[in-house]
Image (cartoon, rainbow, N blue to C red):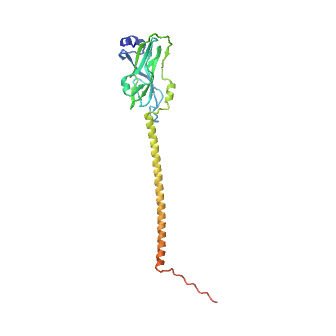
């Protein structure tokens, strides 16, 4: 059975650090964005968001671009009694903006530590967040005939082995657009180069054709002049042969 508001008021002061009664939301408790986040790179080389894990100051903001993953650790450290189980979710207002919780939906019995949320921005644009925002929800429920389990230690920071596979960038819409623009620029430069080469080639061919035409016209003119002279009975004068000299 899920814990209601009165049960949460009674139990949570011993289960959640920084407990505040105002954060009880009917049958859930609102958890805040904590001191460390990681957002997957966009693939654009000059994007200032392409950096490793980030430690946030109070109320410092950050952005999750469209199509990118993010790891967010909670401000609160939480405990789940061995006789209970917890469920986690993202508040509806953030879901409507495109954020999706992909880290799982429950917290094991006898858990102790911060929670690490893995989120994905499936929306059309970037989502802006900041440390201290009450972004997540946690629900508690009793277990029927619970078993004895060891304490499960939670997170105190974002593990590097989780960020490694994302460090090379994702094939997101933003990354694909960047690659498309890069290839388009290369193609445009190549087309411009070919057009310049064709223009030079056409100019050279035109010069060569012009020269051949000029030579042909001159040859035709000379031939026609000779033919016209022959038709008119004009012969080329022949120089007389000098008589042999007698001693």
Residue at image point 46% right, 48% down: 191
Q: Quadrant of the N terminus?
A: top left
Residue most extreme to the front: 144
Residue at screen point 47% across, 47% down: 190
Name the quarter where the C terminus is drawn: bottom right
Residue 245 placement, left or right of 93: right
In the picture, residue 12 is in which quadrant?
top left
Residue 206 image point, x, y percent: 46, 59
Q: Position of residue 91 (x, y in %)?
A: 38, 22
Image vertical order of residue 182 relative to residue 64, above or below: below
Q: Is residue 228 above or below residue 241?
A: above
Q: Nearer the viewer, residue 130 or 89?
A: 89
Seen as rendered, the residue at the extreme right is 247
Q: Nearer the viewer, residue 174 or 147?
A: 147
Q: Nearer the viewer, residue 54 or 121?
A: 121
Where in the figure is residue 246, as x and y percent of width and height? 63, 89
Quadrant in the rendering for residue 76: top left
């Amino acid at each position: 059975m899920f814990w209601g508001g009165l049960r949460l008021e009674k139990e949570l002061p011993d289960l959640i650090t920084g407990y505040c009664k105002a954060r009880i939301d009917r049958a859930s408790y609102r958890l805040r964005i904590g001191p460390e986040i990681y957002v997957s790179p966009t693939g654009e080389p000059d994007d200032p968001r392409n950096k490793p894990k980030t430690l946030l100051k109070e109320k410092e903001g950050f952005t999750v671009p469209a199509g990118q993953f993010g790891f967010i650790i909670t401000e609160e450290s939480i405990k789940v009694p061995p006789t209970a189980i917890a469920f986690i979710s993202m508040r509806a207002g953030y879901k409507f903006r495109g954020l999706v919780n992909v880290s799982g939906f429950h917290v094991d019995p006898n858990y102790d530590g911060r929670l690490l949320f893995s989120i994905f921005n499936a929306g059309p644009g970037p989502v802006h967040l900041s440390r201290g925002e009450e972004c997540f929800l946690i629900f508690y429920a009793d277990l029927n005939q619970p078993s004895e389990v060891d304490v499960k230690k939670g997170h105190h920071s974002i593990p590097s082995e989780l960020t490694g596979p994302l460090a090379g960038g994702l094939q997101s819409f933003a990354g694909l657009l960047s690659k498309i623009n890069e290839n388009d620029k290369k193609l445009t430069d190549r087309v411009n180069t070919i057009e310049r080469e064709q223009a030079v080639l056409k100019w050279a061919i035109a010069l060569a054709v012009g020269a051949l035409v000029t030579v042909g016209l001159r040859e035709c003119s000379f031939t026609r002049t000779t033919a016209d002279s022959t038709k008119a009975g004009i012969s080329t004068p022949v120089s007389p042969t000098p008589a042999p000299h007698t001693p």
